[in-house]
């Protein structure tokens, strides 16, 4: 287990205005995340930021209104992850609700077309396509947009990824992360950007009298899709995103979600009534992502587009089987990667920017390998695999980073210092993708490590687990666990509450090969608490007296709920 420093989150201000109904523990948790008053914890849709703040929005909606009025053929170009799939579903459903009669979608196959709106994907579009609207991609598709324009198509780019030095020559671009864009939140996911386009389009059509003789569509029915894509894409849950996610969760908990998401929740054996963001992150989202990693994301989009419950369950079962295949493949690849690290074949004690490559790895799963190794090593990690049989000399890499190291900017520095070394790259601060030639791998690994050494200090390379302090004795209750579960939504940059306490290990046993089931005694009142810790058993018993960081969760066993500690870290006390 990686050694971690436990630090208590500092309060970001003094809580004020809370009623006695809000527990002091929750007030403290909120204050450590910048939520200081009841108003900041109320996730009301009428407090969403206005779509008009997004640059390029007026041009985009004017063009879409023209395409709808003239009955043009619109093709939504999505992406092969959960954000892209939900975004494509939102675009297709929303445009149809707003009057578009000829709307279809495409999703690139990562092994055939590559990422985004590539020339290869444009060449595969049907001859009747007149408009392309990208979702969760396109800001880096300079060649793809040019190819589409050469075919006489018009292109609207909606994206949230960081732009490169050159923008595509699209008819309109909507992206909160464009340089100079005035939108106050830069954290919208791709699906969120598309939802905002639909909100602005509806307002534009309203001004044009489009709804004078027909009802105005309720776009809030799309919020369950927006919530799923936002959580699964791990974008920061700032206030605006929390409003979107909470609204989508409420729809689902009331049973009003789309058939596909409801079927995926059922297939993952999660409770609709008690659904929370972590269910999206760890159960529903991975089932959709698996299709894009190993098969065809059209399966995922079709699941989200169908209104037939039986058909949705069929798709959910297929996605579940693909996800199980992904899990088995991931476990094998992670074990190989850990073996590489242990043998120091690829990584030594001085390596800061870690790169890993194995010719037998699957390009659709290397991102998960990078994520697991990043957690273990607390280093930025890039895992590579062959791009595919059609081009055996090309590698595709997936990068994951740690706090303080902007991975996309690091790749840009490598690209500037070594022109031609990287063929393509793009992404965010914490995750990115790239491609390069096999014979350039060793040079790239050296160049990437050099940037990481320059940018990261020893202090930054020490893993830190921030906690919300100790849980007072007597509060390890089901009532407290329920309160914490629904006080979010919790997620990226708005983390779930984690507490740290001193315990005595009363008893323990293994579950499977690597998991622990423990009974922990609180020495303050001699109460025993049920606890689990996953992937923690290394052949050694847990400490008899420990300092543990944990989440207070709900164990639902055969319809009976009880509080349980989910250990995140433990060390001898």
Image (cartoon, rainbow, N blue to C red):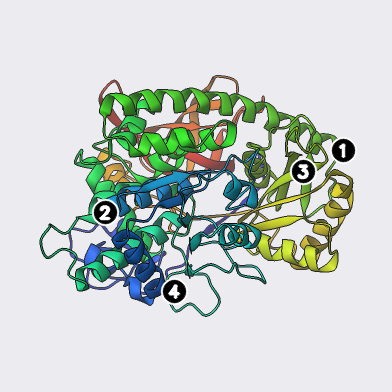
The residue pinned by badge 1 equals: 345
Crowd band around label 3 with a 10 angstrom C-alpha radius: few (<14), some (14–19), many (20+): many
Q: Who is closer to the viewer here, 269 or 211? A: 211
Q: Who is closer to the viewer here, 72 or 210? A: 72
Q: Who is closer to the viewer here, 507 or 462? A: 462
Q: Residue at x 72, y 48 (%)?
A: 382
Q: Which marked residue is nearer to the observer: mark 1 or mark 4?
A: 4
Q: Residue at x 57, y 28 (%)?
A: 327
Quadrant housing residue 37? bottom left
Q: CA distance from mark 1 to mark 4?
A: 49 Å
Comes first in the chain, label 3 or label 1: 1
**Which quadrant of the rendered structure holds the C terminus?**
top right
Q: Position of residue 549 (x, y in %)?
A: 50, 46
Answer with left or right where residue 211 lies relative to residue 442.
left
Q: CA distance from mark 3 to mark 4?
A: 35 Å
Q: Which mark is residue 56?
A: 4
Q: Residue at x 25, y 52 (%)?
A: 97
Q: Are dots 1 and 4 in contact, CB under 8 Å?
A: no
Comes first in the chain, label 1 or label 4: 4
Q: Which marked residue is nearer to the observer: mark 3 or mark 4?
A: 4
Q: Which marked residue is nearer to the observer: mark 3 or mark 2?
A: 3
Q: CA distance from mark 2 to mark 1?
A: 49 Å
Comes first in the chain, label 2 or label 1: 2
Q: Which mark is residue 143?
A: none
Q: Residue at x 77, y 43 (%)?
A: 395
Please, what secondary structure does the residue beneath circle 3 have? strand
Q: Position of residue 306 (x, y in %)?
A: 31, 35
The residue pinned by badge 2 equals: 247
Crowd band around label 1 with a 10 angstrom C-alpha radius: few (<14), some (14–19), many (20+): few
Answer with left or right where residue 16 lies relative to residue 327.
left
């Amino acid at each position: 287990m990686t050694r971690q420093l436990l630090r208590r989150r500092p309060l970001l201000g003094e809580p004020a205005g809370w009623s006695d109904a809000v527990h002091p523990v929750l007030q403290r948790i909120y204050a450590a995340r910048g939520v200081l008053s009841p108003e900041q914890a109320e996730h009301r849709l009428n407090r969403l930021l206005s779509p008009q703040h997004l640059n390029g929005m007026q041009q985009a909606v004017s063009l879409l209104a023209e395409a709808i009025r003239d009955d043009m053929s619109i093709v939504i170009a999505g992406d092969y992850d959960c954000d892209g799939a939900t975004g494509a579903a939102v675009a297709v459903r929303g445009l149809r609700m707003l009057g578009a009669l000829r709307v279809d979608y495409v999703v690139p196959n990562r092994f055939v077309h590559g990422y985004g709106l590539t020339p290869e994907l444009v060449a595969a579009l049907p001859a009747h396509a007149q408009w392309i609207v990208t979702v969760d991609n396109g800001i880096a598709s300079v060649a793809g947009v040019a190819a589409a324009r050469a075919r006489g198509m018009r292109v609207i780019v909606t994206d949230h990824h960081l732009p490169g030095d050159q923008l595509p020559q699209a008819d309109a671009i909507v992206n909160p992360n464009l340089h100079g864009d005035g939108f106050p939140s830069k954290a919208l996911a791709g699906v969120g950007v598309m939802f905002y386009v639909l909100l602005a389009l509806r307002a534009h059509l309203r001004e044009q009298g489009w709804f004078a003789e027909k009802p105005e569509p309720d776009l809030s029915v799309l919020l369950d899709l927006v919530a799923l894509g936002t959580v699964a894409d791990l974008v920061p849950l700032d206030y605006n995103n929390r409003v979107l996610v909470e609204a989508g969760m409420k729809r689902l908990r009331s049973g009003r979600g789309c058939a596909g998401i409801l079927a995926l929740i059922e297939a993952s054996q999660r409770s609709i009534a008690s659904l929370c963001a972590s269910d999206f992150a760890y159960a529903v989202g991975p089932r959709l992502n698996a299709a894009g990693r190993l098969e065809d994301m059209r399966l995922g989009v079709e699941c989200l587009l169908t209104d037939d419950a039986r058909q949705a369950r069929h798709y959910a079962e297929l996605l579940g089987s693909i996800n199980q295949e992904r899990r088995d493949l991931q476990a094998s690849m992670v074990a190989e990667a850990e073996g590489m690290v242990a043998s120091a074949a690829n990584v030594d004690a001085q390596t800061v920017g870690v790169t890993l490559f194995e010719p037998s790895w699957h390009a659709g799963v290397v991102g998960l390998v990078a994520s697991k190794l990043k957690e273990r090593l607390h280093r930025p990690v890039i895992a590579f695999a062959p791009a595919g049989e059609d081009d055996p000399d090309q590698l595709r890499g997936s990068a994951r980073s740690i706090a303080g190291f902007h991975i996309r900017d690091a790749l840009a520095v490598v690209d500037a210092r070594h022109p031609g070394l990287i063929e393509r790259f793009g992404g965010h601060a914490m995750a990115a993708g790239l491609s390069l030639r096999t014979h350039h791998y060793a040079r790239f690994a050296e160049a990437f490590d050099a940037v990481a050494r320059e940018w990261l200090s020893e202090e930054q390379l020490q893993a830190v687990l921030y906690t919300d302090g100790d849980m007072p004795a007597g509060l390890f209750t089901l009532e407290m666990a329920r309160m914490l579960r629904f006080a979010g939504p919790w997620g990226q940059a708005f983390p779930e509450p984690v507490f740290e306490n001193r315990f005595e290990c009363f008893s323990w046993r293994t579950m499977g090969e690597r998991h622990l089931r423990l009974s922990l005694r609180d020495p303050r009142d001699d109460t025993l608490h049920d606890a689990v810790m996953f992937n923690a058993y290394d052949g050694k018993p847990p400490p008899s007296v420990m300092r543990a960081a944990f989440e207070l969760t709900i164990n639902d066993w055969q319809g009976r709920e009880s509080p349980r500690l989910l250990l995140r870290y433990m060390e001898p006390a």
